[in-house]
Amino acid sequence: MTAILGISAYYHDSAAALVVDGRIVAAVQEERFTRKKHDASFPVHAIAYCLEHAGLDQQDIDYVGFYDKPLTKFERLLETYLAFAPLGYQSFRRAIPLWLKQKLHVPRDIRTHLPRFRRRPVFLDHHQSHAASAFFPSPFEEAAILTIDGVGEWSTTCLGIGRGNEIKLLKEIRFPHSLGLLYSAFTYYAGFKVNSGEYKLMGLAPYGEPRFRDRILKKLLDLKEDGSFRMDMGYFRYCHGLTMTSPKFHQLFEGPPRKPESLLTQRDMDIAASVQSVTEEIMLRMARHASALTGAKHLVLAGGVALNCVGNGRISREGPFERIWVQPAAGDAGGALGTACFIWHQLLQKTRQSNPRDHLEGAFLGPEYSSDSIRDSLEAQKAIYRLMPSDDELCDHIARSIAEGKVVGWFQGRMEFGPRALGARSILGDARSEQMQSTMNLKIKFRESFRPFAPIVLLDRVNDYFDWKQGEESPYMLLVAPVKPTLRLAPVENPSTAFGLDKLREKRSVLPAITHVDYSARIQTVDHDRNLLLYKLLKAFEAMTGCPVMINTSFNVRSEPIVCSPADALRCFMMTDMDVLVLGRYVLRKEDQRNVMSQSERTNYLRQFELD
């Protein structure tokens, strides 16, 4: 037996992954245990879970891999500060102590937290880890590889090819020229938090018009036909400053950065639309170049920009590839998985067998809880529950509740790896409801009203509801597609009079809760093999309503990670206006809970999620 532990840490979304004899056994982010969103600390709890799940101890680990090379990254940091000196001194003063205290000492930290592991750890290049995470678990024997993020050591984008048990990186874009950092700069400028608010910018984009697109392409970027580019760094401060953008940037885009939580203006929406349009154009050009360079029929993607599901959807529909596959934990967390897979396949030269689906088992790679442990958690909190006798009766009961307009917390099996809830730690609702989008955003998720919700749909019915590529699957909710024109409705108002967030009031399709203002939806397909219980629930809902589509959003509230344990789920349920909670076969109704949480506890907790 060969056990390989992959680790990512110290920037954002630290994680651990375990591969045993080539099989991906476990993978999980540290944030799920510590309850600190995007936790970057050494993944002590994630490592402990992976080993416990596999029944292994520290001395059973054969290899430990880390997802980047700290010394090379530190070299880039020093060279960048020297290049801009004396500018950047304040940023330098803040960064260096953390590097000298922690980030340069990964081998020491591994020895400290894994004292019974005696070998030297393996360090991979950051984009090598991303590329390995994209290709080795994918369903393809051969594929072009694109890894696009902020920055690793020096690379910000890499293009490569994967064949069998080997990946090879062929071309790169180097720091400071970065699509990920360009998008993060606009995220900052729009008043959202860098490294967590980029998906908000993507969700805001359809409310605006891309009137700044040409300005970005003419002033900020020198974009080539192959998708490579150089940036005019006079507009940015991320190399040497404490902000992402410069006064020159603010002058170009007609004002200072938006203050967080302040009123969103039409300019903010137009800014979002413009950078999203440019990002999609760059992604498409990169994909076409990857096809021309490698001759591959398939494409795999990873890196933080690969979480831009609108761009992914355009590559799928308009690009030259027969199929694309996006690694569900495409950001830094996935680097832990890629490192472990790279050691097994490429360093140890072990044979890789492709799987028509993929090797991730639906990304259900995290903790699960027995029926007894769920019951003990409920009884410890004096919760009132009903135990359903079978899965079929459970699905019929919950499908009826959703059809009646109730919002359901759905907690089942092993937790998902990555930022998307895929039906293990989900909140479910009726996609046909006109009120559900605003209800979920404001009363359950406590987040911005403009944020769209994603649909889950039976795989064999996806083409009935969406303009979808024949044979394409989207089990990880990373592709956006248009709602079919035949299901769209004429806007309530004249389109010329609906601007900005006023577009929210328009009913756009027969599935208004999941149809974004541009008639798009971020789709998760559900099949019998990957998630049998969710499949049964959708089938039961379809039998009752004729509709095989529901809302699926992550089981958490604003600023908190997705729930991990039954106790996390019960707490989130009690602090929101969710109607029903399902933990395994245990069903709880909100109106039955009298002694679980006081009103004052709930009120104090909710204050931190109030929106301006």
Image (tube, grey):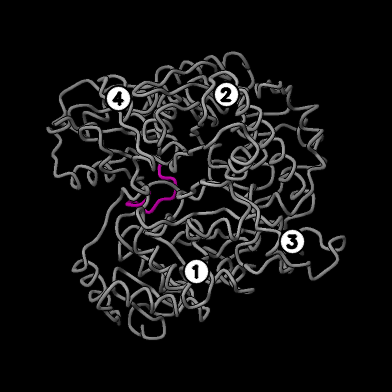
Q: Mark 4 points at which residue?
A: 345
- Answer with left or right where residue 112 lies relative to residue 431: left
| Nearer to me, 586 or 155 | 586
| Label 3 SS | helix
How many labels were placed on the picture?
A: 4
Question: Badge 3: how crowded within 10 Å, few (<14), some, or many (20+)?
Answer: some
Q: Mark 1 belongs to which amino acid? A: Leu
Of the numbered discs 1 and 3, the one sitting upstream in the chain is: 3
Q: Mark 3 belongs to which amino acid? A: Leu
| Label 2 SS | helix
CA separation in Å, label 4 and label 2 = 23 Å
CA separation in Å, label 1 and label 4 = 47 Å
Of the numbered discs 2 and 3, the one sitting upstream in the chain is: 2
Is residue 60 placed above or below 361 in the rendered structure? above
CA separation in Å, label 1 and label 2 = 47 Å
Q: Which mark is residue 501?
A: 3
Q: Name the residue under label 1.
A: 606
Badge 1 vs badge 3, beta-carbon distance below 8 Å: no
Badge 3 vs badge 4, beta-carbon distance below 8 Å: no
> How far across and how far down the image is residue 98, in percent?
42, 30
Is residue 397 placed above or below 472 in the rendered structure? below
Give the extent of the magenta segment: 31-39
Please say whether residue 37 is one of the residues in the magenta stretch: yes
- Answer with left or right where residue 344 lies relative to residue 358: left
Q: Which mark is residue 371?
A: none
